[in-house]
Image (cartoon, rainbow, N blue to C red):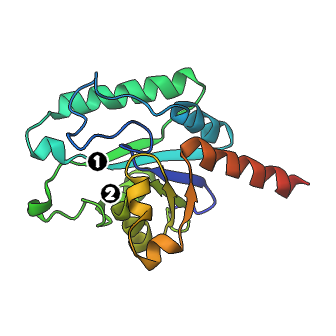
Amino acid sequence: MKTTDKIIVLDRDGVINIDSDDYIKSLEEWIPIAGSIKAIATLTQLGYKIFIATNQSGIGRGYYDIVTLNSMHERLEKLVSDQGGEIAGIVYCPHIPSDHCACRKPKVGMLDQIQKKFKVDLKGHPFVGDSLKDLEVAENFGCEGILVKTGKGIQTLAVDSELVRKTRVFNDLEDFVASLIIKSDNLRL
């Protein structure tokens, strides 16, 4: 495994696209958050490999199928590509909580899948999410949890948790990427 890669793992709903308590069930409902596509492209241009790990229990609940999910991901990849970026890989958990699978966040199965399939080491790298489950999977796996205020981020900030209190928080994915650009510019000075 390569440990020197620059890697960022992203949650999908609420970080990249608008989330809904009623689930994102169709390609028409999959709407990017302003600035998120360009932010992913910018990360690629800065040399980062971008992976997405997303719970998609709407499949297990029968709200949509894998073909629909794939169409959403194909649109995401095309939009990012059109901006000069690339997504290295997308993994998802189709299970409902009562399935007790090993992949549903906050369990680490999806991050294990990324490591094995793409031969990368995710430990210590940022995992950007909007929910407590995202922060928990980052903590459980050894990633750096990053919270954005989009999606369920504001609600997550209200949770009385040491994990939330110690997490770096950004307005959105674009704000997080801007902080990386500033950091890299300062390192070059």
Residue named by callout 2: 110
Q: Residue at x 35, y 32 (%)?
A: 73
- Report, in whole angstroms, how far the alpha carbon at label 2 lies from the one at label 1: 7 Å
Disc 1 packing (10 Å; few <14; some 14–19; many ≥20): many
Q: Classify mark 2: helix, strand or loop.
A: helix
Q: Are marks 2 and 1 in contact (CB under 8 Å)?
A: yes
Please state which of residues 61 and 150 is positioned toward the viewer in this rendering.
150
Asked if residue 130 can be seen in this view, the reply is no
Residue at (28%, 27%) from the top-left corner?
A: 29
Tell me the residue at 42%/58% (across/down). 115
- Please state which amino acid type lies under the numbered disc 1: Tyr
Q: Position of residue 107 (x, y in %)?
A: 29, 67
- Up/down of 5 relative to 61, above or below: below
The quarter holding residue 74 reads: top left
Indicate whether 48 appears above or below 105.
above
Q: Position of residue 97 (x, y in %)?
A: 14, 60
Name the element at disc 1: strand
Q: Is residue 49 visible?
A: yes
Residue 94: x and y in percent read 19, 48
- Judge by depth and name the residue closer to the eye, 183 or 118: 183
Ranked by sequence position, the earlier of labels 2 and 1 is 1
Residue position marked by numbered label 1 in the rendering: 92
**Residue sticking out furthest to the bottom:** 162
Compared across the picture, whether 27 is left or right of 170 comes to: left
Q: Is residue 189 left or right of residue 93?
A: right
Q: Amino acid at mark 2?
A: Met
In the rendered view, would you say 84 is above or below 138? Answer: above
Q: Is residue 149 left or right of residue 178?
A: left
| Residue 99 spot, x, y in % from top left | 9, 60
